Image (tube, rainbow, N blue to C red):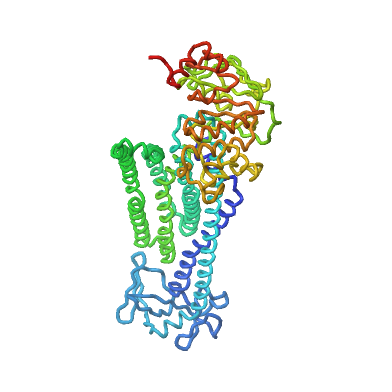
Amino acid sequence: MNVTQRLVRYGTLYKKKFLLALAMLVLAVVADLSGPMIAKNLIDEHIVGIEQTWYEVPRRVADAVLYGDRYYVRAAYAVLRDKKGATATLIEVDRTFYFVPRTLPFTNQPSVHDGRLTVTLSGKSLTVKATPLTARELFRFYQPEIPKMLVLAMIYFVLLILSSVFTYGQRLLLQMTANRILQRMRRDVFRQMARLPIAYFDRLPAGKIVSRITNDTEAIRQFYVTIVANLLSSAVNMVGIYAAMFVLNGQLALICLLLLPILGAWVVMYRKFAVPVNHHIRQLLSEINATLNETLQGIPVIRAFAREERTYAEFDDLNTRYFKGQNRLLMMNSGSGWNLVGVLRGVFFIALISYFGYRAFHLSGVIPFGVMYAFVDYLNRMFQPVVQVINQLSGMEQARVAAERVFELLDEEGIDVIDGGMARYRGDVKFEDVYFSYDGKQDVLKGIDFEAKHGQTLALVGHTGSGKSSIMNLLFRFYDPRDGRVMIDGVDIARLPRQYVRQHMGIVLQEPFLFTGTIASNVSLDDPAISRERVERALRDVGADQLLGHLPSGWDEPILEKGSTLSAGQRQLISFARALAFDPVILVLDEATSSIDTETESVIQAALDVLKRGRTTFMIAHRLSTIRNADLILVLDRGVIVERGTHDELMERKGRYFQMYQLQSGTVSA
């Protein structure tokens, strides 16, 4: 299924509203396109129409005109019984109307000399007496037409109102439906983010993902709100205009029909050159967003290392390339729109006027003036949807490229979020000969094998990159092992939904992340199952009242983005209280005390002695003094467990752990 089909598929989710909008659009077009037909009838039947044969009637009847002492009725209004009297003709020569007491053949070259009218037809001349009409006499011949012209004018006015009402209704409905589609699409994209594996976020910068959710979906919104509405309106208008043209004159309509293949060829050519440019522009926009996101997060580092100019140069390079890409697209768009339409309009007007002049000159089925007026009106109207179609090509291609990027994200293989939960498990954790690789080539864990019983504290130590955090990633099922099993209470967690496994786990990361809100909301994460009392108890248990209790609003103190107004230790305390408030069976502390000062660490250690009871606790730590009381310490090196045991046992072995401890405590010999 291609991009366009998928965009249409989203539209079919609200097909009833689209069909209603389409029906209103058709009614608006019919009402609008009736105007030239009414104008054509007004001209041919009621303005130019008096230049017809008139029948003399013996008495005054409906639509009769008094001229001299006799009554005359237009041929169009005379019934069969009225067509027995003498005939007369009104004809205009050099802006003067003449009354001729007989029927005249149609001619385009009448002339008047000394009260005599001469007409020529097929090389033969006819000269008859002609009496000029005064303005008052001419007005009498128009008097029967005035009521009919007023009726047509009222009909035209009513149709204009109806067209405006239906146009407003269909545009409002289309745009509301388009916004609804976009709302659904953004919801799907955001839900998809919850399904994507952690590995996806490792390889794609956050700024690029944000760009797809914001910039790309906004381009798609323009597709539904503006482009679809305009293209649909243009298509219906063009169908209606061509239908009206064929009703008026089939041969002239066939000439105008040549516009369609020209327009189709232009669309094909435009797409051929515009699609690569649009792809390049959208990619650059994503890179700009990614650069901005990275720069905003790294401003302290940038300033500390005086990287402002270098960062500016990198951004300026991206910005310049984006500018040049936009200019290339602008150059292509400048060749279309009004420029192209102006040329086409001129060509078709020349063809129309030439055809009309040829027919008039040869007198072979001369086109009535009203038909000519209506055709010119329709031709003008036809180029309005043509302009709309051509002007929407750029936006349409941008939307298609943006949709391609969004659908690429939606098509990523994800993991369904399963509602529900599982009973609180005991918390016995076992790794059986586990191998794991992030890239599928080089293993970062090799044959990891250990067991942690319920209520025990297990510590993981080792140099950076030894595999400590990878073990926790597997425990939380952020990733799955390449080989081996991770089990909780004897059950392979690969057989359980990820949400079920994590439901009874808590984690405190080395870099705590706080959301915009309050201290209390960051602890509960607005989970209705976490009561206010439970939040406050968790904060007190970790000793947060000692370091945060002095704040003006207490636990309702506002927290800005990422907790920028708090110290690292204060942020970590809130993160620690968050984990405890959810009362986990398995508690993971990923270097949770590395950014905390000694005084704060002593507060947390005191709380941990109480809180670890009844929980299986995993501690990843560089500061070995924090894990002396662990029930089991695993020493890792390059993904392999090289030592295991308690603190005292490992110190007695005088192995790698002993060396690390001696180095940190400053007692290592020179």
In the rendering, at what x and y percent does residue 19 appear? 59, 51
Residue 426 shows in the view: yes
On the picture, is 479 further left or further right than 205? Answer: right
Q: Residue at x 38, y 84 (%)?
A: 134
Q: Residue furthest bottom?
A: 69
Relative depth, front residue between 384 and 164: 164
Residue situated in front as seen by the camera: 580 or 361? 580
Outermost residue, right direction? Answer: 423
Identify which residue, 138 or 602, lies in the foreground: 602
Q: Can the viewer see residue 9 in this picture?
A: no
Judging depth in this view, the residue of 410 and 17 nearest the camera is 410
Quarter holding the C terminus is top left
Relative vertical location of residue 242 with respect to residue 184 in this rendering, above or below: below
- In the rendered image, residue 498, in percent from the top left (x then y), is placed at 62, 29
550 lies above or below 76: above
Q: Indicate the quadrant where residue 426 lies.
A: top right
Location of residue 405 in the rendering, given as x and y in whole percent from the top left corner: 46, 37
Task: Look at 56% across and 14% down and name the residue there.
Answer: 649
Count of all numbered marks drawn on residues in the image: 0
- Residue at 39% across, 75% down: 91
Horizontal and vertical percent position of residue 477? 58, 26
216 displayed left or right of 502:
left
In the displayed structure image, the side of residue 465 where residue 619 appears, left or right:
right
